[in-house]
């Protein structure tokens, strides 16, 4: 029938703490559909996606942030 389900992965929410002003911020990351994409927080941490995600603290402009948690994905939320 030519019926295909394009199931979009659940977006991850990264919780990042700024090393400069210690504010927490959240960044929602939509992982593109494809083979070998992370499906949960553990896989995301081990993947190369995190290194390609830019961080910039809104209040102070610092680009140095520390990942303090990940929610979302299909399972294993904190
Ligand atoms: Zn900051």
Image: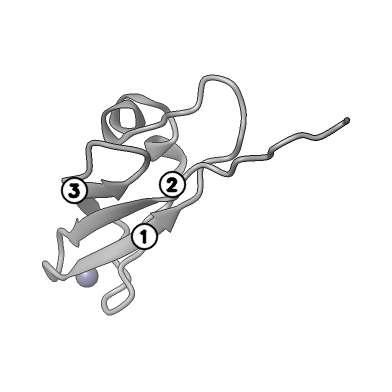
21 relative to 49 in the view: left or right: left
User: In the rendering, which numbered label is found on residue 27?
Assistant: 1
Q: Disc 2 designates what residue?
A: 53
Q: Is residue 10 above or below residue 25?
A: above
Question: For the residues marked 3 and 2, what is the alpha-carbon distance in whole angstroms?
Answer: 15 Å
Closer to the camera in the image, 51 or 42: 42
| Residue drawn where x is 38% and y is 38% of the image | 50
Q: Is residue 61 above or below residue 54?
A: below
**Residues packed near mark 3 inside 10 Å, few (<14), some (14 to 19) or many (20 plus):** some
Residue 13 place in picture, x, y as percent: 33, 54
Which image quarter: residue 5? Answer: top right
Q: Earlier in the sequence, mark 2 or mark 1?
A: 1
- Residue sitting at the far bottom: 59
User: In the rendering, which numbered label is found on residue 69?
Assistant: 3
- Residue sitting at the far top: 36
**Residues packed near mark 2 inside 10 Å, few (<14), some (14 to 19) or many (20 plus):** few
Q: Are marks 2 and 1 in contact (CB under 8 Å)?
A: yes
Q: Secondary structure at mark 1?
A: strand
21 relative to 57 in the view: left or right: left
Q: Is residue 37 above or below residue 28?
A: above
Which of label 3 and label 2 is nearer to you? 3
């Amino acid at each position: 029938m030519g019926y295909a389900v394009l199931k979009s992965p659940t977006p991850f929410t990264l919780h990042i703490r700024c090393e400069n002003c210690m504010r927490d911020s959240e960044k929602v990351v939509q992982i593109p559909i494809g083979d070998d994409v992370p499906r949960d927080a553990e896989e995301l941490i081990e993947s190369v996606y995190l290194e390609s995600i830019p961080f910039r603290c809104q209040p102070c402009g610092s680009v140095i942030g520390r990942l303090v948690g990940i929610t979302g994905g299909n399972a294993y939320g904190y």
